[in-house]
Image (cartoon, rainbow, N blue to C red):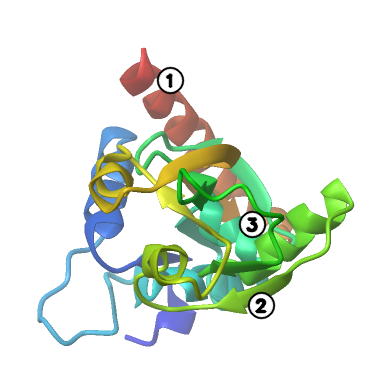
Amino acid sequence: MSFERAGLVIALPKGRMMDDAYAAFARAGFELPAATGERELWHGDGERAVLELRGADVPTYVDLGIADVGVVGRDVLLESGRDLYEPVDLGFGACRLSLIRRPDDDRPIRRIASKYPSFTQAWLRERGLVADVVKLHGNVELAALVGLADAVVDVVQTGRTLKAAGLVEVEVLARSSARLIVNKSALKLKRALLWPLIERLREAARTTSG
């Protein structure tokens, strides 16, 4: 089967969030087709197809119409800058995007390191601040510890890693959790499929959070 022939194409990020997404869809009474092999890039059952992607690629696939819907952390969505309908907060994967520094560093912030450079630049513009933003892919906190940057912007969940590294959370810039995102054209063309799904996921999320 070609995934283009599926009634609904869903883009999911690999890893823990994919497992949580499968569980969220199941709670909504919407079973997704299971993978049949470890190296599958996509799998489907004729009615539904699932694309397995890196999290950062999910907004792109949905925005450009390859997938009708997707699940992605709001942190990734903010960084992507994609204009997508975001109808459901699925509730899992909760974290926050925060400004992080050494506790003894009170110098003006002239350089920030982050895996989220676009989001960081937008935050700086909103505050009327100017600083160089360095994009990193690995251990961002190290940049603050060794002096590569005056501060970093990164995801924080419990804060235990920061405490162990001797860093402090200066300010929470945004809060994140997993979101259902929808292609705007698909919302019109596949209305009969998508609106019931959205409503069932909303109800399941309310029940779970309650």
Secondary element under disc 3, as helix, strand or loop, is helix
For discs 1 and 3, the disc positioned in front in the rendered view: 3
Q: Position of residue 8 (x, y in %)?
A: 47, 64
Q: Amino acid at mark 3?
A: Leu
Residue matched to label 1:
206
- Residue density around tag 3, few if under 14, some if 14–19, many if 20 or more, within 10 Å: some
Residue 127 shown left or right of residue 134 in the figure: right
Q: Is 93 left, or right, of 172 in this rendering?
A: left
Query: Which residue occupies 56% across, 78% down?
Result: 135
Q: Quadrant of residue 210?
A: top left
* Residue 185 visible in the current orientation: no
Separation of marks 1 and 3 at Cα, in angstroms: 23 Å
Per the image, the residue denoted by label 2 is 64
- Residues marked 1 and 3 touching at CB (< 8 Å): no
- Residue at image location 11% in from the left, 81% down from the top: 38
- Residue under pointer 3: 78
